[in-house]
Amino acid sequence: MTGRLSNKKEKSIIEAARKRFAHYGFSKVTMEEIATDVEMGKASLYYYFTTKERLFQAVIAVEQQEFVREVESILQKNILAAQKLHEYVGKRLRYFQELLNLGTLSVHSFFNIKSVFKKSFNNFEKQELLLLTRILSEGRATKEFNNKLPKETAIVLLHILQGLRLRTLKKIKGQQLDEKSYKNLQKEMTLAIDIFIKGIKR
Amino acid sequence: MTGRLSNKKEKSIIEAARKRFAHYGFSKVTMEEIATDVEMGKASLYYYFTTKERLFQAVIAVEQQEFVREVESILQKNILAAQKLHEYVGKRLRYFQELLNLGTLSVHSFFNIKSVFKKSFNNFEKQELLLLTRILSEGRATKEFNNKLPKETAIVLLHILQGLRLRTLKKIKGQQLDEKSYKNLQKEMTLAIDIFIKGIKR
């Protein structure tokens, strides 16, 4: 992927696609429109990305890399591990909203089976798990937390957050995430992480 | 519903259906088989339940009532509120497994839209929420917990547990819940509730 992304033309295509998807959602955007945005013929665009799905995949990959970088920078901060967890949860929630704006809901159905896409989400999950484990281990090392199993605790926290998002997705059923549902989810996640942090504090 | 269930014949039908569904799953059982089990003609069975879905609904209603009764009896026990939460989580997990055995996964797709069925699940959720709120309020009254918002805390806990179940369902994708996934979910829920309880303890 890195080799592909280092290509300047590809980068500009991905950026144009990202803007379109974020504004209209995956299903409402055509390759033609993206080609026009980057002043390119449709045929040339297809040379870089053989399908709209592959282009979407590239957009998601870039978003994931950005998210991971942002969380990495949270990890570098000179703040308590509890505060890092809070910032992570906030950032993760906004990232979730961004994915929905891009149109992951409408993509989900037919991407469900495509293993390449699934693999990239699985890799991302692994990265997230590593980041969370690092925060928890750090909190343990500084005696801020007393959780004896940082990895298992990170898995549970990851799954709790996933579960709350999944519940919201199920509730809105393929619709866009409205402001109210987003606020609700945010409120729930904040309360959940507050209780969670107290639960692992020394 | 109570009027219907007080009918002896209907009760025996529901019990026969429950056994069949629990053993073979909803989609693999025919009305003919259930009719035979209760020594009744197929036509007579249809007099009581006009569709297999309606019969299933009655089975689920009975299961829900039983679950609520069992949790009520946990609430009566002379044990710490934390222990009540633990027992609730364990019982809820077994109830979840039971629903899957009955075939709720295969039912889910075409029941998705039927509002009657949805309503009974929504009612059940409300009952669960009340039970959890009672445990949390009790724990607060005895100064075992320090959570200031018993109802909001109960909602978050309910949603965390729902989310973890949903995640598992998504992972097994319409398959039966195998022993390994069940054990995993159980392990996760136990860790989650342990941390949660510590997080709300005084």
Image (cartoon, coloured by chain):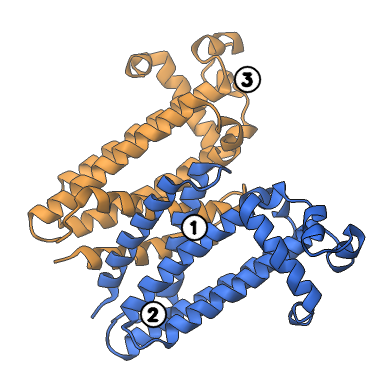
Chain colours: A orange, B blue
Indicate the position of residue B170 as horizontal and vertical percent values: 51, 45
Amino acid type at circle 3 is Glu
Quarter of the figure with the N terminus of chain A? top left
Q: Secondary structure at mark 2?
A: loop
> Badge 2: few (under 14), some or many (20 or more) residues near its Cα, within 10 Å?
few
Mark number displayed over residue A98: none
Q: Tell me which residue sits at (69%, 52%) in the image.
A: B26
Mark number displayed over residue A182: 1
The residues bearing labels 2 and 1 have C-alpha atoms spaced at a distance of 21 Å
Residue closest to the eye, B54 or B45: B45
The residues bearing labels 1 and 3 have C-alpha atoms spaced at a distance of 32 Å
Q: Tell me which residue sits at (66%, 48%) in the image.
A: B106
* Relative to B176, B2 lies left or right: right
> Badge 3: few (under 14), some or many (20 or more) residues near its Cα, within 10 Å?
some
Q: Which residue is mark 2?
A: B149
**Does the image show residue A68?**
yes
Indicate the position of residue B21 as horizontal and vertical percent values: 67, 56
Amino acid type at circle 2 is Leu
Q: Quadrant of residue A30?
A: top right
Whether pointer 1 and pointer 3 mark residues with C-beta atoms closer than 8 Å, the reply is no
Q: Which residue is mark 3?
A: A32
| Residue A29 against residue B16 in the figure, above or below | above
Q: Tell me which residue sits at (54%, 34%) in the image.
A: A21
Q: Are marks 2 and 3 on the same chain?
A: no
Residue closest to the eye, A165 or B38: B38
Residue closest to the eye, A134 or B34: B34
Q: Nearest to the eye among marks 2 and 3: give it.
A: 2
Q: Nearest to the eye among marks 1 and 3: give it.
A: 1
